[in-house]
Amino acid sequence: MTPPRPPTPPATGAALVGASPARAGATAAPGASLASRGDRLAAAFEVLAGVAHELNNPLAGVLGYAELLLRREPPAEWRGDVEALHREASRCARLANDLLALARGWPGEVRPVDAGKLVREAREAVSARLAPAGPGGNGGEIRWEERLAAGLPAVLGDSGRLRQALVHVVRNACDAIEEFRGEGTIVVSGSAEGGWLDIAVEDDGPGMGPAVLGRLFEPFFTTRAPGRGIGLGLALVHAIVTDHRGEVAVKSRLGSGTSVRLRLPVGQGPPRRPRTTPSTLSWSRGALVVTGREDLANALSDALLGLRWRCHVAPTPAIAAALSARNRYDAALVDPALAAEAGPALRAKLAGRTVAVPSATVTLEWLAAALARALLGQA
């Protein structure tokens, strides 16, 4: 039996994202159809898959050598550096896996998943950030409380992906508390009613206003400082939960914390049909790089060609304008030094697809996010 749909929460201070794009509050760009938005999403996922594959091979080597060095007990003065290397490479590997998960859609192995075990694994993932009194905590400033009803039913799904979704929600709660005042409380509750399993994560962090709530699940939307994330976490949570026929409900108010509720149907597994995404990369996408710096032009050209994107370099705004008039580009990457002169013309031609290149070192992580935002028209 198909369980009834869960009730829609109040519109004020809440966001509900489910299997229906309309219920998610998602709207296509003016004049664009849902089909064209789907094409842009598929193109963005194509970029994500390419970047993830490019990242995974070298990261596997870096992680392997770092682990080998740690097992060999390096000198005390080196150990901290090696641990930092391993930690940051692991963070990059998690990002690559997130990109692949978004690009692949549903590949999963369906089996009964225990809710209590999901919560325990999520707690373990953030245990280093929990206060000593919290279960599994070892020195952080965040208190952890669990309020799980007895006898929670299992759900059918991919345990790894569901764990990934819950861990992202819990990490976001930790980040919000730490960036707000450094200490606080996370309450994880679980209940079941009417054929649905609910797992809720509440924090007493800064909360969010309506403007942020309205864009909460957009890929690459983030309010965090540069280098602290690129806005994939909650987009991935949305993808995983809706792949399992579930919904994500968020309630928040500025200064009053946030509650994220994952709702999953009991006894009904995800559909067998995977999300449609391109399986191979092509040369159909093109980018215009606007810079007079040879080092920046070479770095961006090499990275774009590695992702199988066509690339033209314009050393001046006049050449950029001429190229954009003759060619179709999916993204324009503009040197900040030329942005004032080149920006207006390019934005008129490439609305939503013009990205300012950061003055700091350009990373593959930044390029992936920039290209995907451009393909979605959100640059």
Image (cartoon, helix red, strand yellow):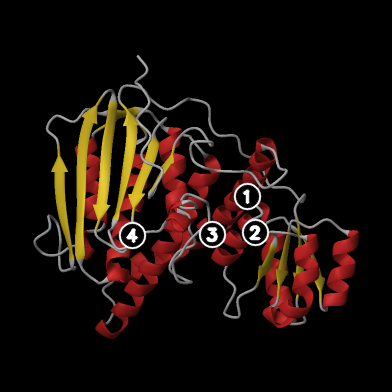
Specify the amino acid type for callout 4: Gly
Label 1 residue SS: helix
- The Cα–Cα distance between marks 4 and 1, rounded to whole angstroms, is 29 Å
Give the residue at mark 2. Answer: 371
Residues under numbered marks 2 and 4 in contact, where contact means CB atoms less than 8 Å apart: no
Q: Which residue is denoted by mark 3 in the rendering?
A: 55
Q: Are marks 2 and 1 in contact (CB under 8 Å)?
A: yes
Is 88 rendered above or below residue 233? below
Q: Is residue 267 above or below residue 23?
A: above
Type of residue at label 3? Leu
For marks 2 and 1, give the CA distance.
7 Å
Tell me which residue sits at (38%, 41%) in the image: 248
Q: Residues within 10 Å of mark 2 (few under 14, many from 20)?
A: many
Residue 86 is left or right of residue 198, and the answer is right
Q: Distance between the residues labelled 4 and 3?
A: 34 Å
On the image, the x and y values in percent for residue 55 come to: 54, 59
Q: What element carries label 2?
A: helix
Q: Name the residue under label 1.
A: 44
Q: Earlier in the sequence, mark 2 or mark 4?
A: 4
Residue that label 4 marks: 207
Mark found first going from the N terminus, 2 or 1: 1
Q: Quadrant of residue 3?
A: top left
Q: Please, which residue is most extreme toward the top here?
A: 1
Q: Where does residue 335 sit, x and y in percent of width and height?
A: 70, 77
